[in-house]
Amino acid sequence: MPDRPLQRDYARDELERRFVLRALPPAVEASAFSRLRDLFVAGSQLRLRTVEAPDGSVLIVKLGQKRAAPDAPTDVRRRRLTTIYMTEGEARVLSGLPGRRSCKRRYHHVEHGVTWAIDVWEAPASRAGLVMAEVECDSLQHLAAVPVPEWVEREVTTDPAFSAFELAE
């Protein structure tokens, strides 16, 4: 089973680090991406995400919520993620809600046995071209031990300005 599957369990703990990159790593195939369209619903911790193939066809739609881990509320590497998978029709009902929106291309790249999710922001316009990467692991020890590739500019896990919510408009 891939370590970054398209569909996951309903609720799970997420252990993640985030990084800013100078550019898309050279080993990544520029045409091999999915497009993520997000709506962060105003007044909530909900995110409506539509995942599209490069041709624009919808692969999956999901409503998610990230909250602090109950046993470590101040550890930004740890979150409790809940996901509900939806139909496109259900998503259309919710897509008119107010909130912040973003769009980015997502690539996957395996290095040192770890799958990196690399995002190139397309919208909002103020973020266009921003390249970020995230890595998830199954333990904090494994997460801390992940070797940082040379294509990473800096880690921003603890910088709230680099959360997807803050980057969206």
Image: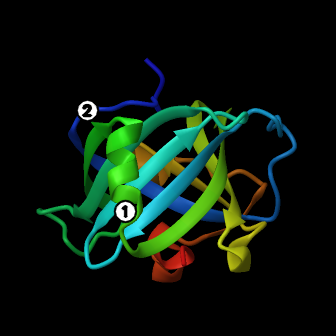
Quadrant where the image shows the N terminus: top left
Mark 2 residue element = loop
Decide: is 77 above or below 106. below
- Left or right: where 12 falls relative to 76: left
Q: Is 100 left, or right, of 140 in this rendering?
A: right
- The answer to whether any part of residue 4 appears in the image is yes
Q: Residue at x 41, y 74 (%)?
A: 99
Nearer the observer, 128 or 42? 42
Q: Of label 2 and label 1, which has the lower sequence position?
A: 2
Q: Which residue is mark 2?
A: 9
Instruction: Pick the residue in front: 47 or 162.
Output: 47
The front one of 38 and 153 is 38
Q: Position of residue 65 (x, y in %)?
A: 27, 58
Quarter of the rendering containing residue 44: bottom left
* x 29%, y 69%: residue: 75
Q: State the residue in front, 141 or 137.
A: 137
Residue at the far left in the pictured view: 71
Name the residue type under label 2.
Answer: Asp
Residue 138 visible in this rendered orientation of the protein: no
Kindly indicate whether the residue at mark 1 contacts the one at mark 2 (C-beta within 8 angstroms): no
Q: Residues within 10 Å of mark 2 (few under 14, many from 20)?
A: few
Residue 128 in the image: x percent, y percent?
Answer: 75, 69
Query: What x and y, as percent, mark residue 105?
Result: 68, 49
Q: Which residue is mark 1?
A: 77
